[in-house]
Amino acid sequence: MIAARLHHYHEPLRLDELDEPTITDPHDVIVRIGGAGLCRTDLHIQEGQWAEKSGVQLPYTLGHENAGWVHEIGSAVSNVVVGDTVIVHPLVTCGLCRACRAGDDVHCENNRFPGISTDGGFAHFLKTSARSVVKLAPDLHPRDIAALADAGLTAYHAVKKAASILHPGSRAVVIGAGGLGHIGIQVLQALTPAEIIVIDPSEQARALAGEIGADRTVAADGRQVDTVLELTDGRGAEAIIDFVGEGDAVAQGVAMLRDAGSYYVIGYGGRVDVPTIEIISREINFIGNLVGSYNDLAELMTLTAQGKVTLHTSTYPLEAVNDAMADLDQGRLQGRGILVADPV
């Protein structure tokens, strides 16, 4: 099979010819990839930001947003059969540790993270487990939903947390209406009664945000804090959902946050630098979000089947992986980029 692999940090990926993965455990599932989503984390991996945290050995195959068709299963797999259309939860989890038994498989003590800590889905085939595959209706094509495996899942995970504080009359500010943000806007509309205010520098992104559920859109033109405060009667928003997490976004987001409000961090690359007296006196909260649980993904796919969440995508052949990475890095992508390794 062909796989796009990182051989050296700060260098383009290489297309390598590799053996197909094989079944070695009764619960293994091998998926023929029909779509693999591009993520800014792939750029951060290429830049070496994940080298120490993941402990991965180069070379390896990137790609942690994967969907396709079941190609082969282990002897103990009973939830899918060969030929089923599936989306792949990004983590391979044990099912036995305390976190897994509590339904918090995001924090599985024995997890593997294909595309980050082990070989991922920028390839013709991906090896995962029965615990990681969500069976889909056969009329859903993997290329149309692959990015929901991580981008959509992370957005859903964050919004589901925020939903508990977003009552009628409340406001949620979404920072960034790009690949993750455009999913988060739709999930907010589906799960909460809050007024949705979206901030983005791109007129095109703001227009899309308005089409998919934003009540108000605000240009990131240096005046966005004042604008949001005006829209919220000077009080700020109950929830800030930050899909950028770098540059001035964090400081501006904190300034837009209502007292006792919560700041949901999804995008990363910057720093949260807030005096502790500010946190205490205003009683504000900062909440990190890393992907989501298997149940989160299953719930998100239900919203997708109901037509409440739709991905905006651009597709690339696997062989054009470095062109796709460059488009993502240079901001030329609206929505999500999807690598198609198998056009069937």
Image: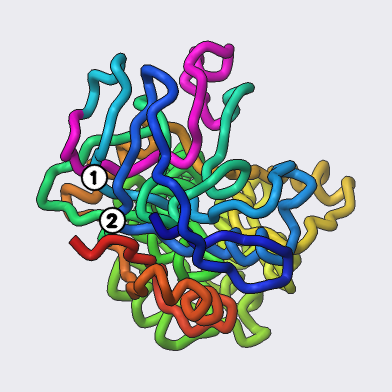
Q: Nearer the viewer, residue 103 or 32?
A: 32
Name the residue at 54% across, 53% down. 61
Residue 280 lies, with reference to residue 308, above or below; the image says above
The quadrant of the rendering that contains the N terminus is bottom left
Quadrant in the rendering for residue 285: top right
Looking at the image, which is closer to me, 156 or 226? Answer: 156
Residue 34's label in the rendered image is 2
Residue range corresponding to the magenta coloring: 81-106
In this view of the protein, can residue 270 be seen by the observer?
yes
Q: Is residue 168 visible?
A: no
Residue 41 image label: none
What x and y, as percent, mark residue 36?
39, 58
Q: CA distance from mark 1 to mark 2?
A: 7 Å
* Residue 175 sits above or below residue 30 on the image: below
Q: Which residue is mark 1?
A: 69
- Count residues near mark 2 (Cα–Cα under 10 Å), then give few for <14, some for 14-19, many for 20+: many
At horizontal 30% and vertical 14% (from top left) the residue drawn is: 76
Tag 1 and tag 2, C-beta contact below 8 Å: yes
Quadrant, the C terminus: bottom left
Q: Main secondary structure of the magenta part?
A: loop
> Amino acid type of disc 1?
Trp
At 54% from the left and 49% from the top, the residue drawn is 115
- Residue 45 as seen in the image, left or right of residue 33: right
